[in-house]
Amino acid sequence: MSTVDLTVRRELLYLTKLLLSFLLIPPQHSAAAPESEQLIVFVQPNKSPVEDMFRERALLEIRNFIRTSRFVPQGDKLQRRENIPVWTKGRSRVWAPLKVAPVSGTRPDGYNHDAFVAQALKGVAKGFSKFRIQKEVELDRADRGFYMEFNPWLSEDGTLFITVVVFSQFDCKTPVYSKKS
C-alpha cells in the first residue's frame, strides 16, 4: 500500500470518527436557544495554512455577506426603485442610487438642502454617458447595482469640495471607491 493510500485512509478514518462522535453523543441542552443566524465552521487545527487567515478575515466577510444578502431581492419578485440612474446593458441593468449629504463647513446664507440636492443630482446626471435617470424601474436578480454618496464641504472662501464614495450592493459599510476633490 502506498503512502498516499495510507494518508487517505487515515483522513477517512478521522472523518468517520468525527462524524460518529456527533451522531452518538446526545445533544446538550442549554438555557438559551442558539441564534438562528449562527454560523458553525469546523477547522482541523494545524492542518491547513489558511486556518488563521480564515479566522481573521473570511469569518468577518461571511458574516457581512449573510447580513447583507438578506436584503438583496430574491426569487421572482421584482424590486421597484424610483428616480435612480440605470444603465441598460444587454438583458441586465446596472442601477446606482445617489445620495447627497447636507453641505458641511461654511454654509451660505439661505442654504436650502432640497434645492441643493436637486441641482447636484441634475449635475451628476449630466455627467453620465451610459446611465439614465429612471422615474420608475423594476429590477430583478440579474441586475446589479452600487450606491454613490456625495459629501459636499464648503470652505470659508467659497470653494466647494466633494468627497465621492461608492459602495457595493453587497456591502454598504466598506466603500469600494473613495475620491476627495
Image (cartoon, helix red, strand yellow):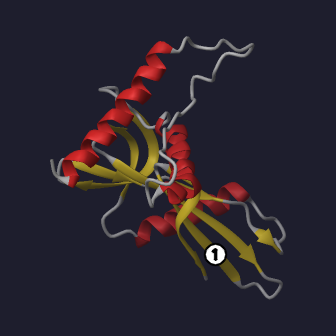
Give x and y (percent) for residue 101.
68, 60
Residue position marked by numbered label 1 in the rendering: 162
Say left or right for 109 vs 13: right
Q: Is residue 17 above or below residue 23?
A: below
The quadrant of the rendering that contains the C terminus is bottom right
Residue situated furthest front in the rendering: 1
Front residue of 14 and 178: 14
How many dots with numbers? 1
Q: 107 or 97, which lies in front?
A: 97
The residue under label 1 is which amino acid type? Ile
Rendering coords of residue 99 (x, y %): 59, 56
Tell me which residue sits at (69%, 80%) in the image.
160
Residue placed at 57% from the left, 13% from the top? 27
Question: Percent from the top left, x then y, of residue 169?
Answer: 46, 50
Would you say 87 lies left or right of 110 here?
left
Residue 106 placement: quadrant? bottom right
Crowding around mark 1 (Cα neighbors within 10 Å: few <14, some 14 to 19, many 20+) is some
Residue 141 in sight here: no
Provide the secondary structure element on which disc 1 rests.
Answer: strand
Front-most of residues 175 and 67:
67
Front residue of this view, candidates 68 and 134: 68
| Residue 42 visible, this orientation | yes
Give the image location of residue 37, x and y in percent.
57, 28
Question: Would you identify the image quadrant in which residue 128 lies?
Answer: bottom left
Q: Going 42% across and 69% down the picture, which residue do you hit?
A: 126
Instruction: Identify the residue shown where x is 25% and y is 44%.
Output: 8
